[in-house]
Image (tube, helix red, strand yellow):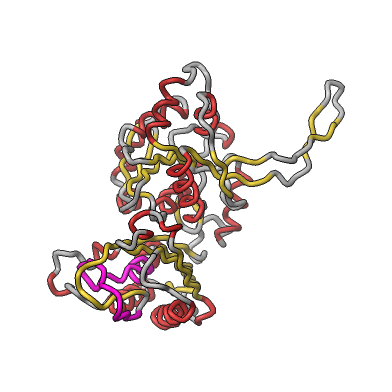
Amino acid sequence: MSGFADAIVVAAGKGTRMAGLDKLAEMLAGRPVLYWALAAMRAAPSVRRIVLVTPADAVSRLSETDWVRDAGALVTAGGARRRDSVAAGIVLADAEVVLVHDGARPFVLPEVVEAVASAARRDGAALPVVAVTDALKRRTADGHATAVDRGGLYRAQTPQGARRGLLLHAFERAARDVEYGDEASLLESVGVSVTMVPGDPANIKVTERADLQLLRALAGGRAGGRADAPRHGLASDGHPFGPADGLRLGGLEIADAPRLFGHSDGDVVLHALADAILGAAGGPDIGRLFPASDATTAGIDSRRLLAHVVQRVSTAGWVPSSVDVSVLAARPRLGAARLDAMRDAIAGLCGVAPSAVSVKASTGNLSGPEGAGRSISATALVTLVRQPG
């Protein structure tokens, strides 16, 4: 991974409101809750490393789990309190910005992660929030309801982020006998201002059984990971520019831009898409299928790699039904004509209608290596369904 932030995923809690149920192991669209939380961090271009903090007795087991290894996560033991677990994670998280995310929030969008990371880098600390929309009431001493003005009230979400130095400062200065509900509260307690950025109503934390039911509805798998439920895959890829001309991007050849470094042709869009498809189907990533040590695939057209991946999952009974791709690049200019051409190329390779494919591009506010024009990264979200018949 490349980027300026490390993400600590906290998964060391006890889940006392779930009657002994291991909420992070519950299935959503055929994958555990924790899988999706790690996948969301992996899909964010700003995140270069993931640190997974778990109970001590789960470190060995999770370290050997395929999807934890595929996320590139470092696994370490947490403590009795949230602040103890975050403190354990920050030992391994040494990037400019540190993000802290609840392992029980599986469906945070990469765009939210990017917004928090960028704001924390710029302002020092940040968190995502959503406005309170329900009417609020306070119970009086005699048991009656009285209205509470919800103006200016927000629900805090994660990931919450801060420059690493500020977070360390907060841990050193904050009262040790106080249990802070989140990192923003910890930072605020020592005088650090925390910027709010827009969150997402679907970024739900699994706290009670009803939360799992709602998330399963969002995931399109109400039966809790039944064999025929739609599956979702999320993946990202990024490469720096190389010296050769002839960029390959989204199945297109762009002659007036330099090619990206890579063992194949460096097409980060198709690589992210292929990994997302493989992830949804429970397969290995393309790095294992087409290792850099294999000289026969050096410089190979990534359209061939993607076609192989689509055929592989088709053999297992899965086909793509929708594709959503985001490209982060300052150069070359990705206008409507090029994005439409990428959409059509991807639709043809995946065997879906162009209307089932979305391709978007951003300069990332001209931050990071992509914003400086040194590299391109892409994130892909794919839904697979059972092959008819």
Q: Magenta stretch: residue 301 in it? A: no
Where residue 319 appears, x then y in whole percent?
44, 74
Where residue 150 appears, x then y in whole percent?
75, 39
Q: Magenta stretch: residue 258 in it? A: yes
Decide which of 166, 360 is in the foreground and name it: 166
Where residue 207 appears, x then y in whole percent?
58, 39
Please state if 102 lies on the left or on the right of 152 as rendered: left
Decide which of 153, 87 is in the foreground and name it: 153
**Compared with residue 142, is residue 216 higher up or lower down, i.e. above or below?**
below
Residue 46 shows up from this direction: yes
Q: Quadrant of residue 220?
A: bottom right
Residue 102 shows up from this direction: no
Residue beneath the point at 46% across and 40% down: 161
Please state if 210 lies on the left or on the right of 25 as rendered: right
Residue beneath the point at 48% across and 21% down: 174
Please state if 24 lies on the left or on the right of 67 as rendered: right
**Total numbered circles:** 0
Q: Quadrant of residue 313?
A: bottom left
Where residue 126 appears, x then y in whole percent?
51, 41
Magenta residues, start to end: 252-274
Residue beneath the point at 59% across and 58% down: 218
**Compared with residue 344, is residue 238 higher up or lower down, i.e. above or below?**
above
